[in-house]
Image (cartoon, rainbow, N blue to C red):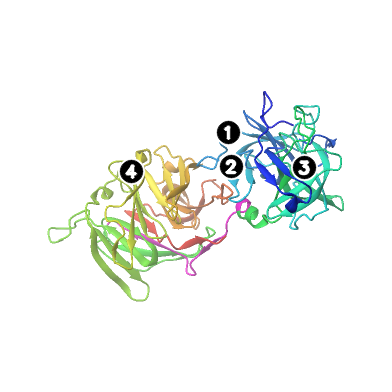
Amino acid sequence: MTHGRGKPARRTRITVLTATVLAGGLLAATPAVAVSGGTAVPAGTHPFLARITTATKACSGALIDPSWLLTSASCLTATESGASSEAATVTVGDTVTAKVAKVVRNPGRDVVLAKLAAPATGVAPVAVGSTAPQAGETLQVAGFGRTATDWVPARPRVAPFTVAGVQGSSVAISSADGVDTCKGDAGGPAFRVSGGTAELVALSSTSWQHGCLDVTETRQGGTETRVDDLGGWIHQHIVPTPVSCAAAGAAIWTARSDGSLWRYVHSSAADGGLTWTTPNAPIGSGWTGRTLAGKGGVIWDVHRNNSAADPNPSGTLKRWVYSTSTGWSGGNDVGSGWARYLTPEYANRITVDQQNRIFMIDDQNRLKVYLWNDATGWWVNGVGDVLDTGWDRFDSITAAGDGVLYARKPTGELFRFQYDFTTSAWVERNKPVGVGWQMFSEIFSPGADILYGRGSNGTSPWTGQPGPVLRWYRHSDNTDTWAPSGPDGMGVTVGSGWSAEVHVTAAPDSCKLTG
């Protein structure tokens, strides 16, 4: 089993575990460990075993779900968009081959989840155990790495190892037969067998590589990384995150061409149902500018001057607050110079997230953010903070969570971004999530990665007649999936009309992720 190709990798001693911890003498380790001895795994046996190859290395893994496998962090790393830093191919079940579409690293261990571009249908995954390995327990350790005689063996090998000791997330293993894991076994499964069923408890991490081809080391033993206690983390990333919306639903505001402002409530915003609370009358007038809903009933108005009697010039930013019980308050001027967002070119290049941060693409093509301080009644930074440059490539941005942005190119490609304001760093950048979004004149969100698109044509869900419709989408970032679409495959149609409004905006704190 090989961890690379070409000349043997230099043995690098990276870990020393003491005898008091492992009850078996000093065990040092080199990264990425096939089994030097053991037996070849017969075809059809342990189909969850995975071989992972890139242009520079090969390693092992375990299929735990038709679309997901676990392996070592030394095997696969992620780019800012979550894709594998190297094109990687996975083979499982002897015949099923797929590309790696996404990599998620565990923050505290030598473990990553890798999502396959296509599910490994017909291959039985291995169950992840929930009980820690115990000293003296026998585990089966398998992998596609080097053996004592083969650089790249035709079949994976498996051998029994005894647990010498457990400390935290590390499991020390040894073999009475003197075999070790070798280069190419990194990420390979360590599993117990009970009643003929395999249960994954750890992954191969480091080893002395005793008995491996071209290795002269006389010391032996290795270290596995536990996964039996990662069930919650695994579930968090392979199952779509649950969504919860306000009891009443998502508040959606529409500003019409006559300046009237209307407040609708989509009661089934979490699942794209057809339950709405429809107003009988508007709740405001004079809203001819750019309307943006914020959290807590805040409504931002990039004001458009209505007449000579209007004392506010176009581009004045006003901050209002609406309460269903007490009505309107506020309306103070809180900024100036925002007139560009009244133009067709910039109207969709401004948005508000669930924390009331206003994101905008400015005239220098920078992504900027403004945060309102409720305690002081003014901006945290009156000139805004620059988060990124080069955003002229996008004609629309939509906030859909805490620091979450969906950005659209004029050609319809949609990308997801997420900025962590605690660490002042991007969690995700330029992640492609869809195409064809140029059909919408406006995209808005109530939070929780839910998107509404208006301006496209379809079939009314009530009358069955063709015409302009409102479409609903929900994206799950952890699984890279969209909620099922309607019959036409373009989201779920949740309304008809919605084409005559000047702007439509949703309260961005209406819905939140609960997982």
- Furthest-top residue in view? 6
Amino acid carrying label 2: it is Lys
Q: Nearer the viewer, residue 435 or 137?
A: 137
Residue 126 placement (x, y as % from top left): 76, 48
* Residue 102 circle label: 2
The answer to whether residue 12 is left or right of residue 498 is: right
> What span is in magenta?
237-257
Task: Tell me, yes or no, whether the two marked residues, 2 and 4, touch with CB atoms within 8 Å.
Answer: no
* Residue 86 circle label: 1
Q: Nearer the viewer, residue 512 or 25?
A: 25
Query: Is any atom of residue 128 visible in this view?
Result: no
The residue at the point 30 percent across, 71 percent down is: 328
Q: Nearer the viewer, mark 1 or mark 2?
A: 1
Amino acid carrying label 3: it is Gly
Image vertical order of residue 234 relative to residue 152, above or below = below
Circle nearer the N terminus (2, 3): 2
Q: Which residue is mark 3?
A: 221
Q: Which residue is mark 4?
A: 366
Circle nearer the N terminus (3, 1): 1
The answer to whether residue 398 is left or right of residue 305 is: right
Residue 221 placement (x, y as % from top left): 77, 42
Image vertical order of residue 509 relative to residue 190, above or below = below
What is the spatial separation of the Cα atoms under label 4 and label 1, in whole angstroms?
Answer: 30 Å
What is the spatial separation of the Cα atoms under label 1 and label 2, in whole angstroms?
Answer: 11 Å
The residue at the point 52 percent across, 58 percent down is: 272
